[in-house]
Image: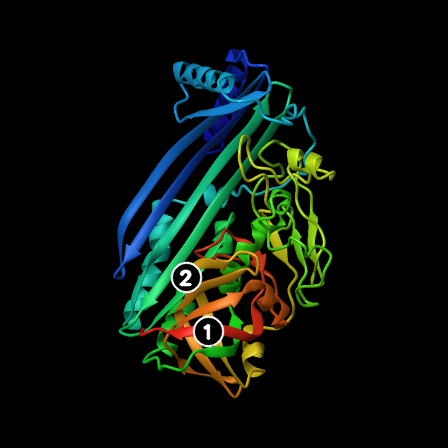
Amino acid sequence: MADTHKQLAKEIERIAELVLRLSRADETEVDITAATDALTRFANNTIHQNVAERTISISVRAVTDGRTARASTNKSDDDSLCRAVESAVSLARNEPKTPGLLPMLEQQKYQKVSRFFAATAQTTPRDRARAVAKVCKMAEKNRQTAAGIYVSGSSQSLLANSRGLFARYEQTRSEFSVTVLEENSSGWAKSNSPDIRAIDPLALAESASRKAAESRQPREIPPGRYTAILSPSAVLDLVGFLFYDFAGTAVLDKRSCLNGRIGKKIFGDNITIWDDAYHPLQSGPAFDGEGVPRQKVLLVDRGVPKNLVYARSTAKKMKAKPTGHGFSLPNEYGEAPMNLVFAGGDKSIDEMVRSTDRGILVTRLWYIREVDPYEKILTGMTRDGTFLIENGGIAGGIRNFRFNQSIIEMLANVEALGPAVRAAGEESFEMVVPAMKIRDFHFSEVTKF
């Protein structure tokens, strides 16, 4: 395994050196990612699919006379690399000049991050199958039906350019997601980590099983504004819609909900948000799409939006310093914070429930869409475990709701926070967020399931 890993690293380096040697552009950049991913899928308490793939993506950006363009290939032979280089140069020559195009970076210094775990990279189909078999056996014992996925994989990437930049990154990934079904109820759980040892598939499945059992025969209650207790997964899929609003480009183009609100208190005192690529629960490289070192940025301080993130060109336009959050060029989005970390609290979900006279406990959300970008009003639905809280206890499952809720208002109404954890959902990329107890959450319609 170690030898194969080293061989791949050498091959990626060979490709980068060849691309830079072949190019006759004024400046050339090459971005290479090689990945191995494997997936075990199960349904009806049976594994029905096991697949694996190895991929390589090679992207070449050329700059000629102030013009830039990119060409990509998934073939690593010399002829294919030559064609990719020629395509990037030819496209660049036919592009209009890019106003304010900055020179590519020279070599940078990066803070070390360790996100490659041998245990994850060495996980076999048999390892995943054994874990899934325990999950299916548990579901059968409880007269339930389990379905889900178990994923493991690894990747190596290299960003290099003709000015001497040479940035490497390697990471493993693993994910387990399970839905447990009964006749008229369901439960769900999911976890994601670079270290597969941080994931306990059976414990996740047992949690989903309890939610399915406890939400049997869901009753219907009227829509309205309720105290809502949201799991970290549910919180993640809502606050994930905020990430681009902290981009300098979005504010410059007046497409951010923070336009006119920077420096003003709009959230509660208990809301503090960082972008921190170096947090131990985060993932991703220590550099952005141009190779700029990522900075830790305080985005919200006790309810007040304080700072934005900037790509190099955006920073120059807005007379700020680059923060290492730019995307690969050319692009129309500029930048975004991709490693959001919310400050958490010390209240468990059980404690939140005990302190609630009447409310709703939400496991997860889905089919979320933005209704009003400036007020950040979102709509979507609950699913896979929605419960009524009465007199400090769980009173049983309820039919799912559609919600219509401003995230700005929501984060101003947070009454309690749980510890911040690495959360996985379905509508947003992973972040470090807490469970939240929120007053006056707007559930607008009731469903029939």
Query: Of the residues under marks 2 and 1, which one precedes in the sequence?
Result: 2
Instruction: Report the residue at 29% width, 74% height from top.
Output: 184
Q: Nearer the viewer, residue 427 or 441?
A: 441
**In the rendering, at what x and y percent does residue 275 appear?**
64, 50
User: What amino acid is at disc 2?
Assistant: Trp
Q: Residues within 10 Å of mark 1 (few under 14, many from 20)?
A: many
Residue 443 numbered tag = 1
**For the view shown, which residue lies furthest in the bottom direction?**
391
Give the class, few, some or many, for how many residues have Cα within 10 Å of label 2's Cα (few <14, many ≥20): some
**Vertical arrangement, residue 212 with respect to residue 24, above or below:** below
State the image coordinates of residue 314 (x, y, percent, origin top left). 65, 37
Above or below — where is 57 with respect to 230? above
Q: Which one is nearer the viewer's eye here, 272 or 211?
A: 272
Q: Give the residue number, with chain letter if any, for mark 2.
A: 366
User: For this view, does 402 lie left or right of residue 111?
Assistant: left
> Residue drawn at (41%, 62%), measured in percent from left and top?
202
Res. 64 in view: yes
